[in-house]
């Protein structure tokens, strides 16, 4: 059996190598060789420090069908089930399947399938494992809305597929073709809890090694369980082919025919690998270590996990109005905007403008269909999660970068409605404003409960609490985004009304502590420990991070924050202190409430999104050499190419977009202003093939662990003296050249002058 296993594994690798060779033979605009998909390792980060790990998701870029084995965690050597589909990011999959040999009993449904980690194969286009107790090798390869499981049994006797669903699971079997239908209920928390039902459909066939349909399958259904029994006269190797639809059974069959008709497992696998090779080879690098390339290209793979296109060949089901829509254009869902507006969406504005345009259009359609602009749009509807309305950020950022292929007036209407008519209560987005919101609009800050005061707002979430500081700061940013979009659209009255609200963050600035501190409704400062107060996740006052992180959460008005800190020199010194300030308690006690604040360096948390822009603020304070030092250190320490290699919740591309940008030497500190700030890249050369046919390059000869400090910089041979580059320059295909040395040049970039176009905005 082991010799047979080796043959199977070798044959799979041979197919992969052939696929790579065929792909690399295509015309290549780069002088550098392709074959970057070899560096993708979906297991990187699969063991979390505290919260959610990454998942070894097998899928095509930004596509609907996704799969990863259902396990307790990566460390477990038992798989609970293999799903047909993962509907929402990092959720357990649906239509959960077990494979067994022997008599089916009640205990069979509880049985887990033991594996050997060393016999697993992980690629975005292929998953393979060996069920060591059953002696079965299982492999999986995805299409866009269809997939194939390859099952290699050691015997033809007593083979069964056990599929479980909800209590509404339905199944049919006709001459070897079988269908499944199931319903998934989701409760959204509006003024009153509302339960919605989302249906999914499966059309499936099982074929033998010669491609012949297995017609005499037996199907037995009992409640939410279906048993498919394979006849003994079928071959040992079988192929379970299926397609998913959110529309109906006929569409599932149509998806099947479009994607799987006449295609083999190996051909689908090579097609998937080519799709990934095309995506990750859009960025070519020279230099760096193999480990750095593994981290970089795996991070790039992660950024294609979301959003997902659920348009099924000209139709899509929308969970925002419960209807099926005719549309040839992609309809994207599954996004967590609180995480992804910072770097994930800006990265896509460079790499895939067409998809980003379609995503902005999808947000606009979701507003039209539901009446509210979503913030955490999922397949079934908007998920009430995190604070603020940062969908505003992706629209002003996109608009200023030329993304206008959608109804911008309708999008503006939705953003404005959220901010002027909606509530800012955490986890109650899409609900008409409450008295506490009227207080915010009148006084310019979200009030905290006084210490010891019981909650007075009945709709406040008991776990998420008020989060008064991040709500105030976040909504200030959103009003800035709204007013800037109003400026672009010539809505001068709205500019006058909303632009001052961008300064609301200043109402919670406590000058003595140099932090944002909560106030109660009477305007009294709360006497709290900004490092440790607020309970789980510090949510009574902050959110997932403490006051030291939120001290820098003013991306839209860095000049204003600099003034509050006493000028650039004082701001730079204060930022030094962030990275050096002790936890304030024992590490074991700190993580009782601060488990979201992972990847700590002093009080800086690499593992949570509000920190991502912070090391780049040195570029604005006249000390860009410190940005170069910090970003290189953070990449080196916290992002490794192993199962522990992600410092916090990766959130489907939200964190790994930071890695992609920073590794290339860029970062979008202020989404909504179309420029990027510069740091030291880890590679000697980076080349991005742009969709407009041009190529943007970053050249940093001799870049290494020590050789990281920028001495001089040039754009197309013209020397620049500030650490900024515009989106327009990148998309024009310029070359950014950085001269590096081991010691810092304290004068380069000291003036921190923004590009002239940005200053006028």
Image: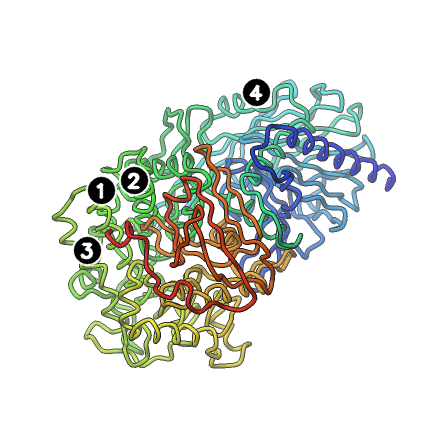
Q: Secondary structure at mark 2?
A: helix
Q: Which tag, 2 or 4, sits closer to the chain's start?
A: 4
| Camera-nearest label, 1 or 2 | 1
The N terminus sits in image quarter: top right
| Residue labelled with disc 2 | 367
Instruction: Tell me if residue 549 can be seen.
Output: yes
Alpha-carbon span between mark 1 and mark 4:
41 Å
Nearest the eye: 291 or 356:
291
Which residue was labeled with disc 1? Answer: 413
At a point 24% along the width and 42% down the height, the residue shown is: 412
Depth check, mark 4 against mark 3: the one in front is 3
SS of the residue at dot 4? helix
Residue 294 placement, left or right of 435: right
Looking at the image, tell me whether mark 3 or mark 1 is earlier in sequence order: 1
Mark 1 packing: few (<14 Cα in 10 Å), some, or many (20+)?
some
Q: Residue 511 or 70: which is nearer the viewer? A: 511
Disc assigned to residue 257: 4
Q: Position of residue 95 (x, y in %)?
A: 58, 38
User: Which residue in the structure is indicated by mark 3?
Assistant: 499
Cα–Cα gap, marks 4 and 3: 53 Å
* Vertical order, 123 against 158 (above or below): below
Question: Residue 235: where, in percent of width, then height?
Answer: 79, 25
Residue 124 x, y percent position in the rendering: 61, 41
Q: Quadrant of residue 274?
A: top right
- Mark 3 vs mark 2: which is more N-terminal? 2
Task: Evaluate if marks 1 and 2 touch, with contact meaning CB atoms under 8 Å apart.
Answer: yes
What is the C-alpha distance between the residues marked 3 and 1?
A: 16 Å
Residue 463 visible within the image: no
Q: Quadrant of residue 528?
A: bottom left
Q: Secondary structure at mark 3?
A: helix
């Amino acid at each position: 059996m082991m010799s047979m296993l080796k043959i199977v594994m070798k044959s799979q690798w041979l197919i992969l190598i052939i696929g790579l060779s065929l792909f690399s033979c295509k015309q290549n605009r780069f002088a550098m060789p392709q074959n970057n998909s070899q560096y993708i390792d979906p297991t990187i980060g699969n063991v979390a420090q505290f919260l959610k790990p990454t998942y070894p998701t097998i899928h095509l870029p930004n596509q609907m069908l996704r799969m990863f084995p259902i396990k307790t965690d990566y460390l477990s050597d038992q798989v609970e089930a293999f799903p047909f589909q993962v509907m929402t990011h990092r959720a357990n999959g649906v239509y959960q399947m077990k494979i067994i040999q022997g008599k089916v009993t009640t205990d069979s449904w509880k049985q887990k399938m033991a594996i050997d980690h060393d016999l697993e194969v992980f690629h975005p286009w292929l998953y393979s494992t060996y069920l060591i107790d059953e002696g079965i090798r299982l492999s999986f390869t995805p299409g866009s809305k269809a997939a194939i499981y390859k099952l290699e049994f050691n015997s033809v006797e007593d083979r069964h597929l056990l599929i479980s669903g909800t209590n509404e699971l339905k199944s049919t079997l006709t001459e070897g073709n079988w269908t499944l239908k199931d319903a998934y209920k989701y409760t959204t928390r509006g003024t009153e809890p509302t339960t919605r039902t989302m249906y999914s459909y499966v059309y499936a066939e099982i074929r033998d090694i010669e491609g012949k349909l297995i017609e005499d399958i037996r199907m037995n259904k009992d409640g939410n369980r279906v048993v498919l029994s394979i006849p003994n006269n079928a071959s040992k190797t079988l192929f379970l082919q299926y397609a998913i639809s959110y529309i109906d059974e006929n569409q599932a069959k149509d998806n099947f025919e479009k994607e799987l008709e006449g295609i083999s497992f190996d051909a689908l696998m090579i097609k998937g690998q080519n799709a990934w090779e095309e995506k990750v080879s859009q960025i070519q690098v020279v230099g760096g270590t193999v480990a750095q390339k593994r981290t970089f290209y795996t991070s790039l793979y992660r950024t294609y996990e979301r959003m997902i296109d659920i348009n099924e060949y000209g139709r899509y089901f929308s969970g925002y109005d419960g209807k099926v829509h005719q549309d040839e254009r992609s309809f994207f869902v599954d996004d967590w905007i609180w995480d992804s507006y910072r770097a994930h969406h800006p990265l896509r504005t460079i790499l895939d403008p067409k998809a980003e345009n379609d995503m902005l259009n999808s947000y606009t359609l979701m507003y039209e269909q539901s009446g509210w602009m979503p913030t955490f749009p999922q397949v079934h509807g908007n998920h009430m999660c995190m604070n603020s309305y940062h969908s505003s950020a992706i629209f002003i950022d996109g608009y200023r970068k030329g993304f206008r292929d959608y109804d911008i007036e309708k999008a503006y209407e939705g953003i404005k409605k959220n901010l002027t008519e909606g509530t800012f209560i955490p986890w109650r987005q899409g609900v008409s404003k409450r008295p506490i919101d009227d207080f915010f609009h009148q006084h310019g800050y979200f009030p905290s409960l006084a210490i010891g005061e019981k909650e007075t707002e009945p709709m406040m979430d008991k776990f998420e609490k008020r989060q008064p500081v991040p709500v105030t700061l976040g909504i200030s940013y959103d009003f800035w985004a709204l007013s800037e979009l109003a400026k672009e659209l010539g809505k001068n009255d709205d500019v006058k009304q909303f632009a001052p609200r961008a300064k609301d963050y200043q109402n919670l600035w406590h000058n003595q502590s140099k932090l944002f501190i909560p106030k109660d409704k009477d305007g009294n400062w709360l006497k709290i420990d900004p490092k440790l107060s607020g309970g789980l996740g510090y949510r009574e006052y902050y959110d997932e991070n403490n006051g030291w992180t939120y001290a820098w959460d003013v991306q839209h008005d860095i000049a204003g924050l600099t003034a509050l800190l006493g000028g650039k020199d004082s701001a730079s010194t204060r930022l030094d202190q962030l990275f050096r300030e002790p936890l304030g308690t024992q590490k074991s006690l700190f993580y009782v409430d601060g488990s979201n604040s992972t990847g700590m360096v002093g009080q800086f948390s690499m593992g949570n999104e509000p920190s991502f822009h912070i090391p780049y603020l040195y570029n604005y304070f006249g000390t860009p050499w410190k940005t170069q030092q910090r970003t290189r250190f953070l990449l080196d320490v916290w992002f490794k190419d192993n199962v522990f290699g992600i410092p916090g919740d990766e959130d489907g591309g939200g964190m790994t977009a930071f890695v992609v940008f920073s590794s290339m030497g860029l970062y979008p500190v202020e989404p909504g202003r179309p420029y990027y700030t510069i740091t030291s890249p880890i590679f000697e050369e980076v080349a991005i093939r742009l969709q407009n046919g041009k190529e943007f390059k970053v050249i940093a000869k001799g870049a290494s662990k020590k050789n990281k400090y920028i001495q001089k910089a040039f754009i197309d041979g013209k020397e620049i003296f500030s650490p900024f580059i515009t989106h327009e320059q990148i998309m024009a295909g310029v070359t950014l050249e950085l001269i590096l040395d081991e010691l810092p040049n304290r004068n380069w970039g000291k003036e921190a002058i923004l590009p002239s176009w940005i200053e006028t905005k």
